[in-house]
Amino acid sequence: MSKGLVKFDEERCKGCELCISVCPVKILTLHETRINSKGYRPACVTDVSKCIGCANCAVMCPDGAISVYNEAEMSSTSLKRTDVRKFSTAENFLRMRYKEEQGGRKDE
């Protein structure tokens, strides 16, 4: 059984291949035949069983098109974005960093 599950929002994916370049187990590729409504070939997983749930792909995705779920969440009845990483998309990561930076400042 895999340690993670990667889900793509194919309509948001521009096929930039950034997720492919950061996957440590090299299981991501652009879909060979599918094209989204914007005319891009979306990314997809070639071997789900090899996913380690690292969330590198989701953090790197500039469009927030990737969600990563960990092993514990996959066994539960409802899937939620991974809590192991407080962020599962680049947008959420940037939002978290902004909140951390603002937390050190006192508002007047």
Image (spheres, helix red, strand yellow):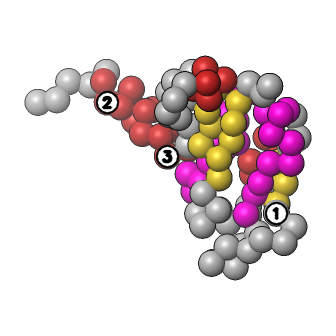
Q: Which amino acid type is marked by label 2?
A: Gln
Q: Which amino acid type is marked by label 3?
A: Glu
Q: Residue 104: x and y, percent?
A: 31, 21
Query: In this rendering, which labeled residue sits more in front, label 2 or label 3?
Result: 3
Quarter of the picture containing the C terminus is top left
Residue at left 68%, top 41%? 6
The local crowd at label 2, few if under 14, some if 14 to 19, many if 20 or more residues have their Cα within 10 Å, is few
Quadrant of residue 15 within the rendered picture: bottom right
Q: Secondary structure at mark 1?
A: loop
Q: Residues in magenta?
A: 42-66
Q: Which amino acid type is marked by label 1?
A: His
Q: Secondary structure at mark 2?
A: helix
Q: Residue 24: x and y, percent?
A: 84, 33
Residue at left 39%, top 26%? 100
Task: Say the numbered circle drawn on residue 31.
Answer: 1
Q: Is residue 94 magenta?
A: no
User: Most extreme residue toward the front, as rendered?
Assistant: 77
Q: Tags 1 and 3 in contact by the CB under 8 Å rule?
A: no
